[in-house]
Amino acid sequence: MAPNDRLDRDAVMSLETPPLQRAGSSGNAAPWAEATADVQVGNDGLQPALSGNGFTYRHDWGARRGQWLLRLNWSELNPRSQVFVSIAEGAGGGPDSGKFIGSARYTVHNVAPRAGGVDIWVNIEWSSDISLYVDYLVVNPALTGTRTVSVTVHRHSSVALSEAEADRILGDMGTILQNDDTGPDVATAVQFVRNGAVRVLPATVPATIATSADLSALLSAGSGVKVVQAIRWCGGPGDNIIGCAPVGSATVNVAAVRFDADQEGLIWVHEYGHNCGLGHRTDDPRAVMFPSVGSDHNVVNAAESAAYLSGPLNITDKVMPASGCNCDMAGLQAPADVRDFVRQGWIEGVPWELASRYGEADARKLLDWLVNEPEKHEKYLAQIVATLGYIGSEIATGALIDFVRSPRTGRAVFNAKNIALIRLGDLANRSASQAAVNFLAQLAGDIDLARSLAAPQAAFEQLEASRTGVTALSAETLAAELAVSATFGLALSGSEPARRTVEALRHDPNAFASVNQAAGEAAQIADTVVRKGRQEYYRMKAQQRHHL
Ligand SMILES: [Zn+2]
């Protein structure tokens, strides 16, 4: 369809459409529909007219006719810029010679500011190309002074988090942004204050985020930071996930777990950065948006500083998975010694591109820690079992199954057991280990086995709850967690029989109800892994930033 065809049809339609009747009027027809809206004012109140910084600019778009989408690149602009446009036929001799009104009708339709520019849709009704000058008036909202972000803090009933601890973490978030730490670090005047008491999350939000549905329930439970016991889903079934958040969000909306006290401020401010529309950055290992934790991760560049000053930005409903990156994740160097790799905490989980680079000799080093010195390396067990799964050597199968079956308890240990089940799927995928697949299939569908494996942890939970005053997780909840993790492991294992088993679990009356539900999501993963292969599944996961 030529641009002018559309114009003509629209013009005819507007003539033929009968005038709209206004409700309550007595035949006095008006040619419009009517709508009313109130000014939406945030905490900051209305900006005074033309506060902040403003720019005007006249652009000569040359000779045109018909409908055009005109994209002007302008680094000063961002999605919050307010842009006003007027257009007319340009007098000969350049923009300074002015505009005039001739017989041609010029219409400006949509005006859409974006990061680094503004796009406009115009129409010139004339039979030949004629000149177009466009005046742009840009107002960027004022960003002077310290921005104060009010954060509602929630915790799951099974998680301890005092108001003093919440305030300490919120204070650290501000310190990380405000300080000018190194050459490339831009001091960013944002502070975070607690909005009311620390709230207990509703019962609809589970202690452990194990599925996409769990994460949706958590992110829907009001705005703020929500601290749960474990996160094993962030755009896909994952590892030791410390934080997870939508990239772009209308409000502060962050999932996190408790972690080393000196790292929690970084975790929250990193996830809040995702809310502000920021992705990962790997060109500086000290960047706040680098995908791992670290006590020196406190650098924000100019663009990141502007995003933090602007605040949450409603651009997408997708979360940032472990390997999600606009940056060069594959270009990252993995430590030569795998033991240094597993000591690293990865905020959205162990990146598979890096973990997959290690081989059987590295697996032996990790097996030595897992089998002979598990107490000594308890803090890193989750990364150890995840990396063993990604390496995919069959020599780890028995040790991983023994670890899941062992009576070892503790929240870090139980989380690692679940991760071992998920990553046994990766191991089976790479090694075709039938023992791994058999164990996963059995545990996913056998409630009694899951109950017996969860029993030691249930006893631990009771003790822990009486000691700290939090709610204990039930034996049934813990057993179901193991079965759900086995279901996702099965989905990742990539064989057609495993895919059919997962499919059957959706309606298996003898499996946990949470397994029936998780199997719906797991079946889609199994389908992708069987059809496209494991590598392609992870590549898609990283690039698409899966919907919740
Ligand atoms: Zn992240």
Image (cartoon, rainbow, N blue to C red):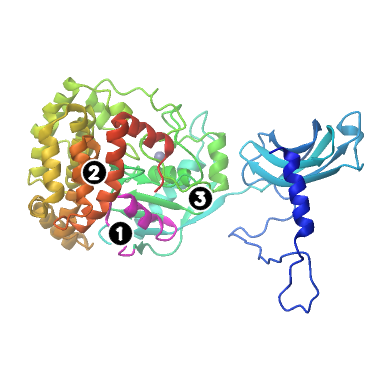
Q: Amino acid at mark 1?
A: His
The alpha-carbon separation of the residues under discs 2 and 3 comes to 40 Å
Labels 2 and 3 touching (C-beta < 8 A): no
Q: Quadrant of residue 401?
A: top left
Crowding near the residue tagged with mark 1, few <14, some 14–19, many ≥20 C-alpha atoms within 10 Å = many
Distance (Cα) linking label 3 and label 1: 25 Å
Badge 2 density bin: few <14, some 14–19, many ≥20, Cα 10 Å: many
Which residue carries the number 1 mark?
Answer: 156
Residue at figure coordinates x 22%, y 63% from the top left: 471
Q: Please say whether residue 349 is one of the residues in the magenta stretch.
A: no
Q: Which mark is residue 191?
A: 3
Q: Nearer the viewer, residue 516 or 127?
A: 127
Q: Residues within 10 Å of mark 3 (few under 14, many from 20)?
A: many
* Magenta span contains residue 213: yes
Ligand 1 within 8 A of label 2's CB? Answer: no
* Three-letter amino acid code of the residue under disc 3: Gln
Residue at image x 43%, y 59%?
152
* Dot placed on the residue nearer the N-terminal end, 3 or 1: 1
First in residue order: circle 2 vs circle 1? 1
Q: Pinpoint residue 347: horizontal percent, then vertical percent.
A: 35, 40
Can residue 230 be seen? no
Q: Of the numbered discs in the image, which one, if any, rests on residue 488?
A: 2
Q: In terms of secondary structure, where does tag 1 sit? A: loop
Say if residue 405 shows up in the picture.
yes
Q: Disc 2 vs disc 1: Cβ atoms closer than 8 Å?
A: no
Question: Mark 2 or 1, which is nearer the eye?
Answer: 2
Circle 2: element type: helix
